[in-house]
Amino acid sequence: MKISIVGTGYMGLATGVGFASKKNHVICMDIDKKRLDKIEGGKSPVYETGLQDLLERVVEKKNLEVSSDLDYAVKNSDVSFICVPTPSKRNGSSDLKFIDKVSRNLGSSLAKKDSYHVVVVKSTVPPRTTEKLVIPNLEEFSGKKAGENFGVCMNPEFLREGSALDDFLNPDRIVIGELDKRSGDVLVELYANFNAPIIRTGLKVAEMIKYASNAFLASKISFANEIGNVCKSLGIDVYEVMMGVGLDHRISPHFLRAGVGFGGSCFSKDLKALVNKSKTIGYDPVYLEEALNLNERQPVRIVNLLRKRVGTLRGRNICILGLAFKPNTDDVRDASSIRVVKELLKFGAKIKAHDPKSMDNFKELFPGLLYCKTAREALRDSDACLVLTEWEDFKNLEDKDFSVMKNRIIIEGRKALNPNKVKDFEGVCW
Ligand code: UDX
């Protein structure tokens, strides 16, 4: 099938490359020409496991091309996926300005096309956005009728950064929210060679499935953190507890890893948007709000623990290992490390940091920290160390690496260190 992808961020690019690898022809469209040049040259603008290799292959095979011309992208494809960001506004609601703009532009492009075309919303949008914003824009700017002259679907993504490509190619399920059967049939055909159950729903159900999934996963982590905080005071390792809990098939062992809190571009953003949406319809979502609040408190907990061990933080050298919001990505958006660093700076600490991939991105937020090429360099002469991302590299650290510290105080915010290689460290909630 011929596909166009509008927006080539992490999600758009992984989706485009994934579809191209399944022998579809993909046009990646973006307004950022520099980004497109990179993609056209077979160079991924983001670090994502496997993406670089597969991108190179699909570009070489001419299964993927780029364009900054939306009319061209629409004219030369059967389906357009909207993959633009939906960031948080200050009040937590979802900022739909990119969705608004792209759906208007897509409407104008549809006006110039005679054959049937399906527009698919892949971006995460609050329930009823496709109905209330996207379709009216498409109809107004195309002068055509949705469900008659063109199709509309809402097809949420469940891609985790760091394994986005694998998640795309091997999904647990594919959700197709459809305006009508004809629109949905096109996506069913597109996904025919994926080995996953397909669920066909209405548009707003598909939008809600995405929010409910992320809200549940985020709450599951906050739940594990809460139990972890209690465990810590009782001298119990919450990881042992969750192993026993997760074996209950009704619960599952996933997303029960306690720690310094969830980060990333989706969980907080989506939870806040759902909270905001609920409030606009007069419902007070206390459970979801508390999952968010608990997440804000975890980074403060690790700094409080540090203060108990170190005493005053003013002028102390604190080493931070791990800045990315999780391993195998250079992304620091909403990372717990940001909250930890802000807290440390508030108490006057000096920070030396190391991360295998994300130091450049972190530097843009905190240019004043000392960034070190190796973990050992960051550890040298430090008064304490906080480990905030469970990178594989850190699992290989040994006692002799920590011997260069001035004071040996090590606290993990994630299960990152190997107890067979490193002695005397504690966890934020274990
Ligand atoms: C998430 C969703 O998983 C994905 O389906 C959605 O489409 C986008 O948002 P992502 O943000 O890439 O994906 O990362 P994920 O692996 O879900 O982890 C998010 C955060 O939760 C990370 O900071 C991670 O360290 C933390 N986490 C995860 C925990 O603290 N404990 C866990 O058990 C799992």
Image (cartoon, rainbow, N blue to C red):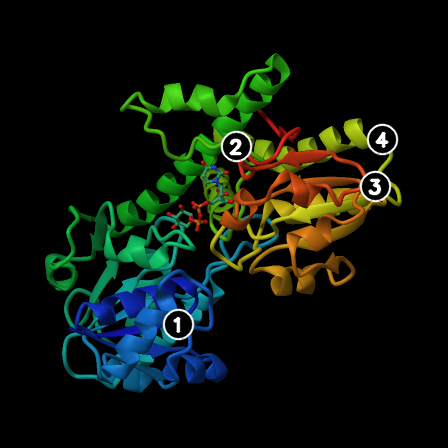
Residue 405: give its label. Answer: none
Residue ranking furthest to the front:
400
Disc 3 versus disc 4: distance between alpha carbons?
11 Å
Disc number for residue 291: 2
Residue at image mark 3: 347
Asked if ligand 1 lies within 8 A of label 2, the reply is no
CB atoms of marks 1 and 2 within 8 Å = no
Residue displayed at 32% across by 23% down: 247
Using the image, tell me which numbered label, if any, was put on residue 311.
4
Mark closer to the observer (1, 4)? 4
| Residue where numbered disc 1 is placed | 102
Q: Quadrant of the N terminus?
A: bottom left
N-terminal-most mark, 3 or 4: 4
Q: Earlier in the sequence, mark 1 or mark 2?
A: 1
Residue at the image position 37 percent from the left and 74 percent from the top = 104
Distance of label 1 from label 4 (alpha carbons)? 53 Å
Rendered location of residue 329, percent (x, y):
49, 57
Whole-Å distance between the Cαs marked 3 and 1?
Answer: 44 Å
Foreground disc of the pair 3, 4 = 4
Identify the residue shown where x is 35% and y is 63%. Answer: 50
> For this view, does 86 lie left or right of residue 384?
left
Q: CA distance from mark 2 to mark 3?
A: 26 Å
Q: CA distance from mark 1 to mark 2?
A: 33 Å
Which quarter of the image is occupied by the C terminus?
top right
Q: Between tags 3 and 1, which lies in front?
A: 3
SS at badge 2: helix
Density class for disc 2 (Cα within 10 Å; few <14, some 14-19, many ≥20) is: many
